[in-house]
Each structure stands twice: as C-alpha cells, then as structure tokens.
C-alpha cells in the first residue's frame, strides 16, 4: 500500500494508468462509494483529486473521496488543509488529518478524462449490479425466515436509532468468502460498526447471513480471505 520512496509516489499520481487503476478500485469498492455518495454534492461523477503526501509517519497515495469542500466551483475538490478521506490502492479507506500532512502533491484530472476511464467498465458494472440485486433479494427472504438473523440485525438497527426490520433498512454489505467451501456469499448482520465511515470494520470478527440461510462467523479479513461485493 505504501511506497518506500516518496519521489516514486509523486510520479505515480501523474501516470494516467495508475489513476485509471485507482478509479477501478473505487468502482468495485462499495464502502468507498458510500463514503463518496455521503460527502459529494454530485455523487454521479467520479472522484478526480489524486493525492500523495506524508502524515508524519508514513507516505500515502490515493484518490480523495470525502472531506471538507474547497471554496471553488468544482464540487469534487476537497480542502487538503482539513481532514480528508483517502482511498488507497489496496482498497483501504483512511482519514488523513490535512493539517499534519506534508509533501502534499495532487493531480486534478479533467472531467472528460475521468469519464472515459470509467466507460470501459460500465456495462460489466451494470451486469454485476443486477446480479447483486438478485442475490440480495434472495437474502431478504432468508432474513425473513431466520429469527436469529433478524435478532442480530435488529440489535444493529436499534444502535443506529432505526426501526426494526422489515420497516427499517435492509443489510447492504454483501461479502464473498474466497477460500471457503459451501455457501460463499452472505450479508453482514453484526460486527464492529465504524460510525465515521458508516460501515462495518471487516478486519474485525463479524457475522453474515449466508445464501443457505445459515449464520456464519468470520474472524475478519486479517484471518480469512473475504471480498466485499
């Protein structure tokens, strides 16, 4: 995730191939897209602010997906002197305290260039979204049929101050167990909730409702190979 030489990092954000690659990471990272949608005025547009810096202890490089808006007309530019949210190339989401950041360098990509970079994956992305909607519809039925799963999810909804299921929101974090046998897909229904990100910390243990209706425990991505869909 972090390069050893900051000069190498600075050259990367100027490389259009690297910028396309980090946008693909963003496009396939549901938690990152949720952060973007929550912070950005026009969430239909792709991020365009690519940053390299050091926070005093490590070198960082990625695309900015949230923070405090700059006093400019472009609603996708963030004030790097304030705290901002950075998506790095391995998919991790970091909160960077801009007032501590040094050696800051940024590339602001032209709008049309960003759109062209995303178009090649547009149809595949749409197909994947339709597949995931079908899977989630099936899991909604599984949730209705599992009192234990509903109990776990209702505890989480109560913590959020939301109504219980089915009046309250449905689980949205769909994960795939890459190395398990049997049911490999499931919705996260319990675990460690990170309020500032509005999402689960999947590096910690969590529970999923799997496609076979079973509640399965995951010890976290630091132990198992898990992908967010």
Image (cartoon, grey):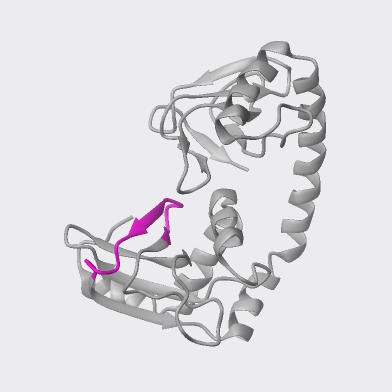
In this view of the protein, which residue sits in the foreground, 185 or 95? Answer: 95
Q: Position of residue 73 (x, y in %)?
A: 55, 87
Q: Is residue 147 shown in magenta?
A: no
- Give the number of callouts: 0
Tell me where the magenta segment starts and ends, as one range: 86-101
Q: Quadrant of the C terminus?
A: top right
| Image coordinates for residue 8, horizontal then vertical, percent | 26, 72
Q: Is residue 164 above or below residue 145?
A: below
Q: Position of residue 228 (x, y in %)?
A: 57, 41
Residue at the spot x=43%, y=74% of the render? 50
Q: Is residue 124 left or right of residue 181?
A: right
Q: Is residue 167 above or below residue 42?
A: above
Percent coordinates x, y for residue 101 in the rendering: 24, 69
| Viewer-nearest residue: 26 or 190 | 190
Q: Quadrant of the N terminus?
A: bottom left
Q: Residue at x 73, y 24 (%)?
A: 211
Residue visible at 57% across and 35% down in the picture: 160
Q: Where 226 falls versus 215 (above or below)?
A: below
Relative depth, front residue between 104 and 121: 104
Question: Quick check: 212 above or below 221?
Answer: above
């Amino acid at each position: 995730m972090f390069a050893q030489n900051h000069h190498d990092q600075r050259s990367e954000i100027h490389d259009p191939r690297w910028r396309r690659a980090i946008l693909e990471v963003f496009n396939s990272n549901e938690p990152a897209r949720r952060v973007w949608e929550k912070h950005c005025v026009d969430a239909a547009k792709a991020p365009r602010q690519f940053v390299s810096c050091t926070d005093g202890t490590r070198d960082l490089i990625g695309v900015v997906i949230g923070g405090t808006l700059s006093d400019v007309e472009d609603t996708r530019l963030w004030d790097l002197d304030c705290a901002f949210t950075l998506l790095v190339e391995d998919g991790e989401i970091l909160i960077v305290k801009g007032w501590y950041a040094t050696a800051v360098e940024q590339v602001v990509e032209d709008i049309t260039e960003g759109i062209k970079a995303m178009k090649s994956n547009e149809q595949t992305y749409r197909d994947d979204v339709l597949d995931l909607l079908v899977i989630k519809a099936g899991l909604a039925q599984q949730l209705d049929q599992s009192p234990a799963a509903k109990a776990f999810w209702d505890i989480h909804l109560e913590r959020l101050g939301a109504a219980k299921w089915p009046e309250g929101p449905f689980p949205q974090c769909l994960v795939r167990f890459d190395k398990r046998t049997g049911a490999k897909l499931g919705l996260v229904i319990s675990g460690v909730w990170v309020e500032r990100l509005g999402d689960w910390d999947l590096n910690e243990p969590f529970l999923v409702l799997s496609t076979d209706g079973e509640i399965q425990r995951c010890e976290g991505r630091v132990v198992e190979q898990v992908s967010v869909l």
